[in-house]
Image (cartoon, rainbow, N blue to C red):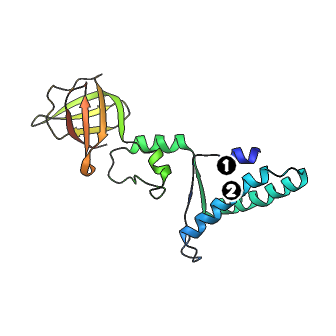
Amino acid sequence: MRLVHAFSLLAIGVCGFASTGTSAWAAEENATKSLDELVTCKAIVIDAQRLSCFDRVSGKIVTARASGELLALDRQKVVANKRRSFGLSNQADAPLGERAVDKAIAVTQVDTTISGVRQSGYGRYRLDLANDTSWQTIDPPTLEPRVGAAITVKRASLGGFRATIAGGRSILVKRVR
């Protein structure tokens, strides 16, 4: 039973190896099958048979993890990493291959406060945020941004980002750090 809980992390991502000729789909099915077998083992009533089943299946899982065929991720760490990288152009939005898990952990907006404001000319500002990121305004804001003001940065259409500062109108922004 503890073994089942040990593997009840957020997601199991699977990748195939070109060197072995195993397709990613087949590797995914094998890893998923091994995890499903844990549930089957749990249902066995006779202790010796249940232990034997857990030993056999856990051996498959350990081998798959060691070879890199099976990847277990912690939901909180993945979401924290996505929040840190929100707005950076070189970050993958779907590290697990566009699965339902990617949608469940997607970060589409960040709510924080402004910790620093620098005017950069032509009505634009560089905004340092409390979450240790920096954004450049593309559109001039209606009101001058102030330190301590609430800001929400959301993913916009066509890969852009829009920020709403202190409940004002949304403006285009881009991440600079």
Q: Quadrant of the N terminus?
A: top right
- Mark 1 is surrounded, within 10 Å at the Cα level, by few (under 14), some (14 to 19) or many (20 or more) other residues, namely some
Q: For residue 7, which numbered disc appears in the image?
A: 1
Q: Locate residue 37, reporting x and y percent.
A: 72, 57
Tag 2: amino acid: Asp
- Mark 2 is surrounded, within 10 Å at the Cα level, by few (under 14), some (14 to 19) or many (20 or more) other residues, namely few
The secondary structure type at the circle numbered 1 is: loop
Tag 1: amino acid: Phe
Residue that appears at 25% across and 51% down: 158
Q: Locate residue 78, reporting x and y percent.
A: 50, 45
The number of discs equals 2
Task: Say left or right for 94 vs 46.
Answer: left
Q: Viewer-proximal residue, 114 or 46?
A: 46
Q: Residue furthest left?
A: 122
**Quadrant of the rendered image containing residue 74:** top right
Q: Viewer-proximal residue, 64 or 97?
A: 97
Query: Does 172 appear above or below 46?
Result: above
Residue that appears at 72% across and 62% down: 60
Q: Mark 2 or mark 1, which has the lower sequence index?
A: 1
Please name the residue that numbered disc 2 is placed on.
36
Q: Locate residue 173, reporting x and y percent.
A: 23, 40
Q: Quadrant of the C terminus?
A: top left
Q: Viewer-proximal residue, 93 or 136?
A: 93
Query: Does 156 appear above or below 127?
Result: below
Task: Say left or right for 45 vs 59.
Answer: right
